[in-house]
Image (cartoon, rainbow, N blue to C red):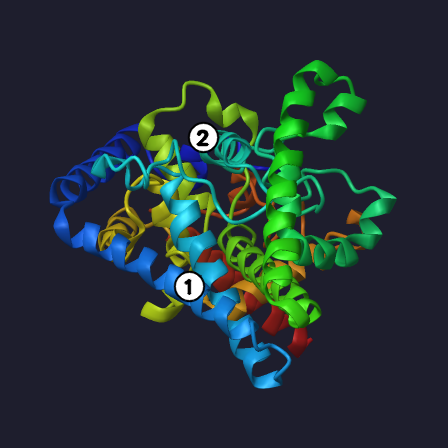
Amino acid sequence: MAISDINEYAHLSDTDVEALGAELDALRRRVEAELGERDVRYLRRTILAQRALEAAGRLALFGSRRRSLWLAGTAALALSKIIENMELGHNVMHGQWDWMNDPEIHSTSWEWDMVCASPHWKHSHNYIHHKYTNIVGMDDDVGYKVLRVTRDEPWEPRRLFQPVSNLVLAATFEWGIGLHDINIGGVRKGEQTWAETKPKVKLFAAKIAKQVAKDYVLFPVLSGPNYRHTLTANATANLIRNLWAYVVIFCGHFPDGAEKFTVDTLESETRGQWYLRQMLGTANFDAGPALAFLSGNLCYQIEHHLYPDLPSNRLAEVAVTVREICDKYDLPYNTDSFTLQYLRTLRTINKLALPDSWLLDTVDDAPETTSERRFDAMPTRAPGLRTALTRMKTSRASRALRARKL
């Protein structure tokens, strides 16, 4: 059901894919050669803005008995946590700023403001997810072990509760990410031993203790008689950050057209095929400068997956060339409005809560699940994937129109 032959699906020859990889490698080298003081200024200003927002929020909450100060403090704190999580923590720990050789802003030393311990995230995200992107059975970010987002996973009765599970995951996203790499379920299934898991649990517990002490004990106590108001403000700011991170990340991985792949695609995978898998397996959303900044520039999820260790402030300009490459090789460039990308994701999550027998699309040609077999019925081979998808869409529309006339 998932894509097993990525060249066939993309309507590209081995030579095409090799040339695609060479162009993307050249783009990386060009950007790396240009990195310098402008990028350093961007990062340091971001850090300064984030810390100023956090300080302003904490100060406002000292007077949080006044509703206006509670709202202002909570908003500033939530914004600070979003920037720290999305534009700083995520990107610094990807190694995007390691070239600066600053020990305080380095992937090996940065610890972010959430309950997930950075070593766990760097393993489950930087290594597993970015290496095995959307490989069914290998990339645990495909549904986060909680949601069914492709028909490659068999339906089970517990999936009926998926709409509720989705809401719970959104509200507690930092906790879900924190548990992601520990894989307690793997101990129960015999996939790993408790001896292997125990050190991870201890590190996770230590991180939880630190975060809980900071947000729910230390700062509330410092606010004296406003303890309860500060406590609720901190909890609200964390909730807002969780919901925002969830929506941004889901918009980059689960809208229509974000493809999934079988393990077969890894066999003798070339650099060009890895690039191609990233391009087909991810999605962007349209964003201006403010939305791009607040999303950690993950509105450019395609570009981020092509170059996970390039500084995020460079992705907007990288996207221009990536679009041109997609045009050249007749490949789709999956982007749309923020709202539409999330609504499509939500449709997939709710739809796949139902048994397959209740669904209309085939297992090889659905918005969330496709394979190279979706093109078997086409009378002639299209010159490229984007043209093939356009022809299929036009054909469906014509059939629907004829059906209505009958």
Q: What element carries label 2?
A: helix
Judging by the rendered image, the residue that carries numbered circle 2 is 131
Q: Position of residue 344 (x, y in %)?
A: 59, 62
The residue positioned 56% from the left and 72% from the top of the image is 61
Q: Quadrant of the C terminus?
A: bottom right
Q: Is residue 74 visible?
A: yes
Instruction: Give whichever of 368, 14 is nearer the camera.
Output: 368
**Residue 176, quarter of the rendered image:** top right
The residue positioned 39% from the left and 42% from the top of the image is 305
Q: Where is residue 126 in the image (x, y as percent from the top left)?
A: 45, 34
Instruction: Give whichever of 121, 395 is nearer the camera.
Output: 121
- Position above or below: 164 against 98: below
- Position above or below: 147 against 136: below
Residue 294: mark: 1
Q: In this view, does 16 lie to the left or right of 302?
A: left
- Position above or below: 221 against 157: below
Q: Are marks 1 and 2 in contact (CB under 8 Å)?
A: no
Q: Label 1 vs label 2: CA separation?
A: 25 Å
Amino acid carrying mark 1 in the image: Leu
Q: Can residue 143 be seen in this view?
A: no
**Residue 187, quarter of the rendered image:** top right
